[in-house]
């Protein structure tokens, strides 16, 4: 798969939304000295390519999932990438990060109950070939959370793979 490159305008649009998720297309266009139509076209293309997604939740506790759970996964180093891909495919897991340090992978998810956490770990994560141990931590109070640390979440298909021509 070819890497997707974002031009300067795409990067500025993403930055604008990371600073103010409620910014209007008109305001962003004015700030970037382009037309509102250009901003609208770029946003649609970024969404279609899976590079941006709009969600508004002031606190994850209001989203019906009261437990933010972080799972430090110890695994065979040679299987780390494969295990990370398997974890990324689980609907219960919202974030997967390959780490250097205490554990190989950090996986995070929002869970309705501790029973659900236990079920996912025992029945879905632990049985994965190469997983040795899962250390679990549960958030009890968010002092600060900045969603801008993870603006782009995955590597989606390129324009060519989507059969798209370049857009202005």
Image (cartoon, helix red, strand yellow):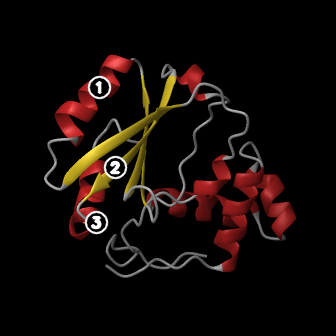
Q: CA distance from mark 2 to mark 3?
A: 12 Å
Residue 77 found in image quarter: bottom left
How many other residues sit within 10 Å of disc 3, few (<14), some (14-19) or many (≥20)? few
Mark sitting on residue 19: none
Residue contact between numbered discs 1 and 3, judged by CB atoms under 8 Å: no
Residue drawn at x 23%, y 41% is 125
Tell me the residue that label 1 is attached to.
118
Q: CA distance from mark 2 to mark 1?
A: 14 Å
Tell me the residue that label 3 is attached to.
81
The mark that comes first in sequence, 2 or 3, is 2
Residue contact between numbered discs 2 and 3, judged by CB atoms under 8 Å: no
Residue drawn at x 30%, y 57% is 84
**In-front residue for pair 18/73:** 73
Residue 10 sits above or below residue 20 on the image: below
Foreground disc of the pair 1, 3: 1
Residue contact between numbered discs 2 and 1, judged by CB atoms under 8 Å: no
Residue 69 x/y as whole percent: 46, 33
How many other residues sit within 10 Å of disc 2, few (<14), some (14-19) or many (≥20)? many
**In-front residue for pair 143/60:** 143
Q: Secondary structure at mark 3?
A: helix
Tell me the residue that label 2 is attached to.
73
């Amino acid at each position: 798969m070819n890497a997707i490159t974002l031009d300067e305008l795409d990067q500025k649009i993403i930055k604008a939304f990371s600073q103010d998720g409620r910014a209007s297309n008109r305001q962003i266009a004015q700030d970037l000295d382009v037309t509102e139509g250009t901003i609208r076209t770029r946003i649609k293309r970024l969404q279609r390519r899976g590079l941006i997604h709009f969600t508004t939740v002031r606190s994850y506790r209001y989203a019906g999932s009261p437990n933010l759970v972080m799972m430090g996964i110890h695994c065979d180093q040679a299987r780390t990438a494969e295990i990370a891909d398997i974890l990324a495919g689980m609907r219960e897991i919202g974030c997967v990060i390959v780490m250097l340090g205490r554990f190989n992978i950090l996986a995070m998810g929002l869970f309705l109950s501790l029973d659900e956490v236990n079920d996912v770990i025992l029945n879905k994560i632990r049985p994965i070939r190469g997983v040795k141990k899962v250390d679990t931590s549960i958030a009890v109070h968010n002092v600060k959370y900045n969603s801008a640390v993870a603006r782009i979440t995955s590597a989606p298909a390129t324009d060519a793979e989507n059969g798209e021509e370049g857009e202005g």
